[in-house]
Image (cartoon, helix red, strand yellow):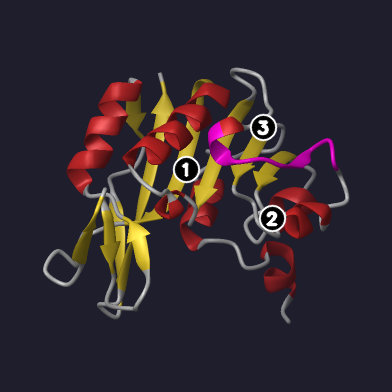
Amino acid sequence: MTDLARLLGPIDIYLLDQILKGRIAPGMRVVDAGCGYGRNLVFLLSEGYDVWGVDLNPEAVASFGDPERFQVAPVERMPFPDAFADVVISSAVLHFAADEAQFGAMVREMWRVLRPGGMLFARLASTIGLEGQVAALGGRRFALPDGSDRFLVDAAMLERWTEELGGEWLEPLKTTVVQELRSMSTWVVRKS
C-alpha cells in the first residue's frame, strides 16, 4: 500500500475534493452521520480533526474505541446539540430511508446539528441518468438494475430541499452513473 493510500484510506473521492478545496479544514468539527467503520474518516482522524459520528451498527461504532465521540444512534435522532458541527457528512446513507418521512427527518436532523455557515456533504443514490431503468416501488423507493431497492432522489427534490432549508449550493449537483446499474449524486450545500 502506498503512503498516500494509507493516509487517505478508502475516502470518497468527492469528499476528498471538498478537503482539497479547503471546505473541510483542520480545526473544524466534523460529524459523520452514518459513519459505519469510518472509511471516510481515516484522513480526518489521522490529521487530528475534531471528528464525531453516529451509526446504527454497534460493532462499527465500537471499532472507534471512543464512546463519547462515536455513538449508536439513528441519523434522524443524533445526540448532538444544535449548531454543533462545521461539517456534516452523509455518505451512502440517505438512500436507506424507508420513505419520504424518514428521509426528511434525517435531513432536518443533520441540518439542526450544522452551525450557520457550515457545510452538508451528502452522497446518495438518485434516479439521475437511470430514469427509464428504475422501477417505482412506492414512497420514492425504486428497484435498481443492480437488483437492490433504494430511496432515490432526483435533481428537483434536492433543489426543493435546499430551498426549504434555506441552504446555498456550494457545488453544482454531480452524478455518477455506475455501469447503468446505479446512480450516485453529490449534494453539497452551506447553511445560511
Left or right: 33 as drawn, with respect to 153: right
CA gap between label 1 and label 2 equals 21 Å
Tell me the quarter of the picture where residue 57 sits: bottom right
Judging from the image, what secondary structure is the residue with disc 1 in? strand
Tell me the quarter of the picture where residue 86 sits: top right
Judging from the image, what secondary structure is the residue with disc 3 in? loop
Are the residues at dot 3 and dot 2 in contact (C-beta closer than 8 Å)?
Answer: no
Tell me, for residue 28, which label it has, or none. Answer: 3
Residue at horizontal 37 percent and vertical 72 percent from the top:
148
User: In the rendered structure, does residue 79 fall within the stretch colored magenta?
Assistant: no
**Range of the magenta residues?**
67-76
Location of mark 1 (residue): 121
CA gap between label 3 and label 1 equals 14 Å
| Vertical side of 128 occupied by 68: above or below | above
Location of mark 2 (residue): 57
Residue at horizontal 51 percent and vertical 46 percent from the top:
90
